[in-house]
Amino acid sequence: MAATAFGAAIRRVEDPRFLRGTGRYVDDLHPVGLLHAVFLRSHHAHARIARLDVGPARSAPGVVAVFVAADFAELNPLPVETAGNGPRPAPRRPLAADRVRHAGEAIAMVIAETLEAAKDAVELIEFDLDPLPVVIDVEGALKPEAPRLYESGNQAFRSHAKHGQVKRSFDRSDLVVRQRLRNQRVIPMAMEPRGAIAQVVDGRLTLTLSSQSPHSVRESIAEVLGMDETLVRVLVHDVGGGFGSKGGHYAEDVAVAEATRRLGRPVKWIEERQDNCAVTWHGRGQLQDVELAARRDGTVLAVRSQILAEMGAHLESFTAPVPTFTPQLQTGCYRIGASENTVIGVYTNTTPTGPYRGAGRPEATYLIERMMDLLARELEMDPAEVRKRNFVPPNEFPYTNVADLTYDSGDYAAALDRVLEVAGYASLRRAQAEARREGRLIGIGLSCYVEIAAGGPADRCTTRLEPDGTVTVITGSTPHGQGHETTWAQIASTQMGIPMDRVRVRYGDTDDPAYAIGTFGSRSASVSGSAVLEASNKLHRQLRRLAAGALEAAEADVLLEEGRALVRGAPSRGLPLDRVAAWAITHEQEAALRAQVSYDPPDNVFPFGAHLAQVEVDPETGRVAVLRYVAVDDCGNVINPMIVDGQIHGAIAQGMAQALFEEALYDPEGQLLTGNLVTYMMPAAADVPSFELDRTVTPSPNNPMGVKGVGEGGTIGSAPAVVNAVMDALSPLGIRHLDMPLSPLKVWTAIRSAPQPDGAR
Ligand code: MCN
């Protein structure tokens, strides 16, 4: 029965086309008359453009045009979000004019009849770059003698906030735990790199993108090109992942759009993997100096942090706001009465950063969860116990934390208890004690998290009964791996009494009667999903009214079940929905076959969870093996448990990868040393263990389905759990903290130079 679709573990309806290779990605499209764009990019991280001669490239075979910065000088600057206090960001256009600030920055764009001709012509561009001194680390960049990226200096912004009695709390504490934590820069590495096709269709500029946010990108492109928004259409088909990195507009999107506007022909640009590593924004990149004030009984009184956040060479659309989310959540799941923080955004000669799965919240969770473990160690208290003593109690929700965020609902102790129970914590600890006696380095790590799954602005959704009796759900959300075609159909099917296979979900066209700011911040279930729910309910009411007319029955007696309109108590009287649609059309009530709603969430939702990792460190090689990984995540009511588990699997793997493997590394000259899939340590399937998942269900009061987002929680919880486990394993050697990634070399080196107080080896 259709009413069971919500909450059922239904297989993703989009998967057959992905598995059979019939998905449609940007590079699969070949409009007639297509031209190809290739960019000349800087090989220096910081340099003046002393000479640029594109003449030979212009006259190369197959070349249609070569654009340089001057060609785009009339465009409006690329819009960016700012944060805190700081100088106004320097206006930026798609191509560098006189100076490049990171390796990979685009200097010129060649447009040719074939990709090969464009690539060959790029080689013919004659140019000289006069290298300038380079700075790649945030601390170095703030020194007075540091090379300056901008006249105003290397500080992009500074923000400071103090909540509660911070000084008093520190003065009155029994102990203060201090630690510097590096949350290293990582590369999002979506399976499908970015790509864009621009073309003029019916007099309008039409952009097909691999993007998470077609509506927002359309607004930005129209702004940069100085066009009326109605003259720009953005299309998104299948997208092979994004993890936040496709959440905004990029210089290449604008350049390709402008080239088409000038040339009147379709232009395609597809990012190659090395450009993807060097140009698409990176994630994380925070240097955190943290202090935690506590009492001997384990009560945490205050947390104070100073964060230097890597901006990279310039601000992309959402670079600056990301680190400002971290302090808002630096008190985590705990009732901590005082919090102070400073965030400084710093420019360096590196790839810009931006939102990456969790965007500021993994950095906050790592900060507080490492500190809770260090506190537990200082107090010689069980890390689970320290956490329990500080949790926000379940009867205090909605709970406004010290930074003024109101957590909608939660039971953090229940999630931790559940993870401890599923893992068999007491016996794990006993086994660890036994193993330690044998000289084995076994560790158990916990992490508890709460995160913000973003809310507004409002989403718009339209539902429509088609003449063939199927229902189309038109959503503003843009799935790129999350399975919205399945979960939105589950919602519509359940609300409307229509089988899942009679519901079709349509997305990714800014001409559609639908809107969403973007699919990020794990916002879609709670915002886009609620819009689907309300638009389904509205259409359901309208269809019952139409069916009542067609069946000459009282509206109150009409039901929709299994895709038919039925009269209560008279099973022989019924109509399939195609007949209801036909009746509406012949009775001039066609408008009632369509319902549109705008859903504006009242507030954010706050998913949470508790994770446990058990690891073993090989003292001979420094290699970390994750023996068990247990995760209890709470995303409120669940629309599709299989999709939720899949999201958590992928997310844990990503957080674990940050803990153990991944890091974007630069040499002192600003050259990315990890700019491909050979050098960047993405984990393979064999590098991650099987995950043991469970959940608690604490519905959110902030939306009609009681759901909370789940797309990022696993990443947020997993990095600190794994690092805490490794540090626990190494604790008998007197090793207190190592920064991520915990590579075999780093761990082995630490073991070799450890004081080994307990003679554990
Ligand atoms: N869901 C559910 N029940 C819930 C909550 C969610 O069944 N209580 C389902 C939703 O209906 C949706 C999926 O789980 O099908 C994820 O929903 P949600 O948590 O709302 O997240 P979004 O759809 O907004 O996706 C964004 C999120 C983010 S921020 C990143 S980053 C991310 C992620 O999702 N990037 C991904 N998951 C990804 N998955 C893949 N495969 N690829 C990416 O790039």
Image (spheres, rainbow, N blue to C red):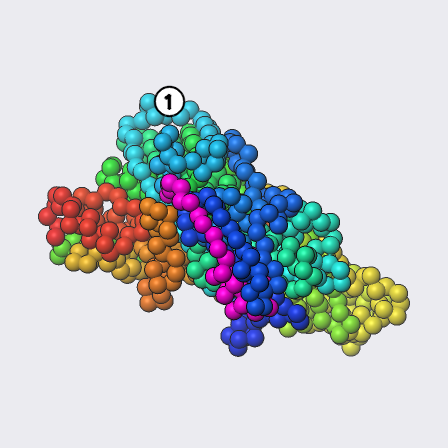
Name which residue lies at 55% across and 65% down: 60
Amino acid identity at mark 1: Arg
Q: Is residue 252 visible?
A: yes
The residue at 33%/33% (across/down) is: 291
Classify mark 1: helix, strand or loop.
helix
Q: How many marks?
A: 1
Q: Is 262 above or below relative to 603?
A: below
Residue most extreme to the left: 759
Q: Is residue 403 above or below residue 469?
A: above
* Residue in the foreground of this view, choosing between 139 and 555: 139
Give the percent coordinates (x, y) of residue 686.
Answer: 33, 67
Percent position (x, y) of residue 113?
60, 68
Query: Which residue in the structure is indicated by mark 1?
Result: 168
In the picture, residue 237 is in which quadrant?
Answer: bottom right
In magenta stretch: residue 599: no
Q: Position of residue 543 (x, y in %)?
A: 78, 64
Q: Is residue 462 visible?
A: no
Going by the image, does 367 lie left or right of 451?
left
Residue shown at the point (45%, 62%) measured from the top left: 273
**Part of the protein shown in magenta:** 109-136
Taking the magenta stretch, the answer to whether it contains residue 111 is yes
For residue 622, side relative to residue 225 (left or right): left
